[in-house]
Image: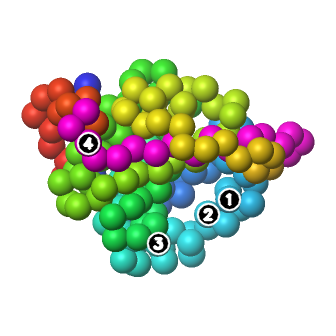
Amino acid sequence: MKKILKIRQATEADLRSILLFEFRNRGWFSQFLPNQVLQQQTEMYFKSLLRSKLKNLQYLVCLPNDVLIGRFNGQLLNSESIEVSYRIAKNFTNQGIAQYVLKHLLLLWASNGVKEVYAQVADHNKASMKVLLSCGFEVNEIQKNAINLAPEIHDCWVFRWSVTEDSYYKIARLDNIQVC
């Protein structure tokens, strides 16, 4: 997989690609994200994000020809905790990409002092639950009726990963990790 994917931090120069990626995949993402989240992701939103102190927590997943196929975002909760969210284009799901990238980012973040990483997933998003569990996350809590994906309301599963010997062992099995 490392030969077919590039994982790199997003920059302002990527704004057009990010907007195009979000537009092309909006229908797919709307199955997992509330409409209000999708609507606030405008050009202005991404510009401010890529100029903020959180810019170093925004990662893109690209093919060798620089076609954007995924995004991973970190949100600081405190100096040692991050919340991660991610999106993979529909045509690239179920190929192990999210798991591969998340393991790389966990190792990167842990080596930079992050002790805990959280993720929130709607109860029907079995693929993301599988990704998180395979990366060493554990269910931290279940919030009833917390995600509105009109016309349905879903429970929110909150997952937590923490730095332990076991979690390091799980992610350290990756060979030649290179995150730029």
Can you identify the residue that label 1 sits on? 37
Residue 133 place in picture, x, y as percent: 45, 29
* Amino acid at pointer 4: Thr
Distance between the alpha carbons at the discs numbered 3 and 4 = 31 Å
Q: Which residue is mark 3?
A: 49
Amino acid at dot 1: Val
Q: Position of residue 40 (x, y in %)?
A: 67, 66
Circle nearer the N terminus (1, 4): 1
Residue 120 forms part of the magenta stretch: no
Q: Is residue 162 above or below residue 83?
A: above
Please report the bounds of the magenta region as a residue range: 149-166
- Please say if 152 is above or below 49: above
Along the polypeptide, which appears first: circle 4 or circle 2? 2
Would you name the residue on which mark 2 appears?
Answer: 41
The residue mark sitting in front, 1 or 2, is 1
Question: Where's residue 89, x and y in %?
Answer: 52, 36
Q: Position of residue 20 (x, y in %)?
A: 53, 52
Q: Residue at x 15, y 43 (%)?
A: 178
Q: Is residue 101 left or right of residue 160?
A: left
Foreground label between 3 and 4 = 4
